[in-house]
Image (cartoon, grey):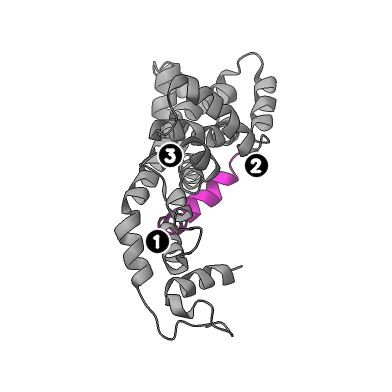
């Protein structure tokens, strides 16, 4: 499983003239950093765009999914079962099908080739998962805690903001991480909805390295290594919160 990661690093340090060596160089005996120089010189705007899209997707996902999960878990509106079913179905729709639908809508709204359009599209992948996870977690919050807040005069919104949100930290971190990673690694929406824009995410930046006659493999792999660092860092940093968040609601006392 780790070999492709190693090979990515190896190729990122390999000189262009050694790419087609036979047998291949299993180690970068004569390393070069020209790929990293090209990546940092050409791909920083794309990395910044991906970062902005990822953070925007996290914000939209939390704004939509947190109240929705709370309502389904504690307020129990009519049609809760049907809503749960629709959320499950929404996660089964292939991204390429959704991309075609977004393309038709964005043409009419003038949102093609915009960062905001990508944030909205990427959020559609994260919101159903987030709502279901928040609902599972919040359903396990004892009603006695909420009843105590209501006795103290807290309304529905105050109870949600002051009691439920602090207790939902692990699930919020889990959802935020997955939403960011989905947006950070997205290629289908980016290539369909933002292909002719000058402001592109890093996935399209890597794709544009591939030319008709030449392929800058060390630059491609160097960009991939740089783009992997934030994801790896976040996964390591949030590991214990993820373990708690993904099992939220799995066991009832």
State if disc 3 and disc 1 touch (CB < 8 Å).
no
Q: Which of marks 3 and 2 is nearer the N terminus?
A: 3
Q: Is residue 71 above or below residue 26?
A: above
Q: Is mark 2 on a helix, strand or loop?
A: loop
Residue 68 coordinates in the image, percent (x, y) = 53, 24
Q: Is mark 1 on a helix, strand or loop?
A: helix
Q: Residue at x 46, y 49 (%)?
A: 204
Q: Residue at x 61, y 18 (%)?
A: 76
Q: Earlier in the sequence, mark 1 or mark 3?
A: 3
Residue 2 coordinates in the image, percent (x, y) = 57, 69
Q: Which residue is drawn at 36% across and 44% down?
A: 49
Q: Name the residue under label 2.
A: 250
Q: Mark 2 Cα within 10 Å, few/some/many (few <14, many 20+)?
A: few
Q: What element carries label 3?
A: loop
The label shown at residue 196 is 3
Query: Is residue 249 a member of the stretch shown in magenta?
Result: yes
Q: Mark 3 Cα within 10 Å, few/some/many (few <14, many 20+)?
A: few
Q: Mark 1 points at which residue?
A: 226
Q: Distance between the residues labelled 1 and 2?
A: 36 Å
Q: Distance between the residues labelled 1 and 3?
A: 24 Å
Q: How far apart are marks 3 and 2 (CA)?
A: 45 Å
Q: Which of marks 1 and 2 is nearer the N terminus?
A: 1
Residues rendered magenta in the picture: 229-253
Q: Which residue is drawn at 52% across and 46% down?
A: 187
- Residue 35 figure quarter: bottom left
In this view of the protein, can residue 14 be seen by the observer?
no
Indicate which label's residue lies in the foreground, 1 or 3.
Answer: 3
Indicate which label's residue lies in the foreground, 1 or 2.
Answer: 1
State if disc 2 and disc 3 touch (CB < 8 Å).
no
């Amino acid at each position: 499983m780790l070999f492709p990661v190693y090979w990515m690093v190896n190729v990122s340090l390999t000189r262009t003239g050694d790419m087609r060596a036979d047998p291949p160089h299993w180690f970068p005996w004569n390393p070069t950093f020209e790929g990293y120089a090209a990546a940092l010189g050409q791909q920083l705007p794309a990395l910044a765009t991906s970062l902005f899209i990822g953070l925007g997707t996290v914000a939209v996902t939390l704004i939509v999914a947190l109240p929705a999960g709370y309502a389904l878990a504690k307020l129990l509106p009519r049609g809760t079962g049907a809503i749960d079913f629709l959320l499950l179905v929404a996660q089964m729709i292939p991204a390429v099908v959704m991309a075609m639908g977004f393309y038709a809508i964005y043409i009419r709204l003038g949102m093609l080739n915009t960062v905001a359009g990508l944030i909205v599209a990427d959020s559609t992948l994260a919101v159903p998962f987030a709502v279901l996870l928040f609902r599972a977690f919040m359903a396990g919050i004892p009603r006695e805690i909420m009843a105590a807040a209501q006795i103290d005069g807290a309304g529905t919104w105050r109870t949600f903001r002051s009691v439920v949100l602090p207790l939902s930290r692990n699930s919020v971190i889990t959802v935020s991480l997955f939403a960011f990673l989905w947006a950070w690694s997205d290629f289908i929406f980016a290539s369909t909805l933002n292909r002719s824009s000058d402001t592109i995410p890093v996935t399209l930046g890597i794709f544009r390295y591939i030319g008709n006659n030449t392929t800058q493999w060390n630059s491609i792999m160097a960009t991939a290594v740089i783009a992997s660092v934030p994801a790896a860092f976040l996964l390591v940093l949030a590991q214990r919160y993820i373990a708690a968040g993904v099992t939220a609601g799995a066991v009832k006392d």
